[in-house]
């Protein structure tokens, strides 16, 4: 029952993902929890071609997006 749903959801996610270059436009610190010592950095990224902005992603997600860009560029250059 869930396998069809999972396939459909995965396909929708792949179609809505932008494959262009993202640029970090803003970084800010956010307090998490009850204590002010728990501070994380969040980033806003922007794609000028699709006019799409991703708000409030963490360092790991930002790095993942930028690494995907590098892999796509090297893959395109190899052909």
Image (cartoon, rainbow, N blue to C red):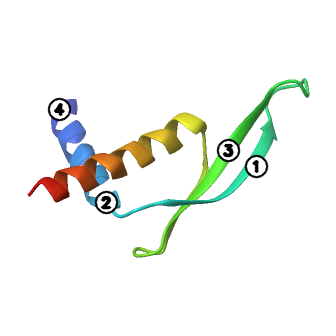
Picture quarter containing residue 77? bottom left
| In this picture, residue 44 sits left or right of residue 16 | right
Q: CA distance from mark 1 to mark 2?
A: 25 Å
Q: Secondary structure at mark 3?
A: strand
Identify whether 52 is placed above or below 28: below
Viewer-closest of 52 and 6: 52
Query: How many angstroms separate mark 4 from mark 1 (CA)?
Result: 39 Å
Q: Which residue is mark 2?
A: 19
Q: Residue 48: percent from the left, percent from the top?
A: 47, 74
Q: Which residue is mark 1?
A: 28
Q: Are marks 4 and 3 in contact (CB under 8 Å)?
A: no
- Identify the image quadrant of residue 21: bottom left
Say which residue label 4 marks: 3
Say if mark 1 contacts mark 2, CB within 8 Å: no
Closer to the observer: label 2 or label 4? 2
**Corner quadrant of residue 76:** bottom left
Q: Which mark, residue 42?
A: 3
């Amino acid at each position: 029952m869930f396998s069809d749903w999972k396939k459909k959801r995965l396909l929708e996610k792949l179609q809505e993902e932008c494959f262009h270059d993202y640029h970090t436009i803003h970084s800010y610190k956010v307090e998490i929890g009850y204590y002010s010592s728990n501070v994380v950095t969040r980033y806003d990224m922007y794609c000028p071609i699709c006019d799409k902005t991703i708000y409030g992603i963490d360092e790991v997600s930002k790095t993942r997006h930028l690494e995907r860009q590098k892999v796509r560029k090297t893959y395109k250059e190899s052909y």
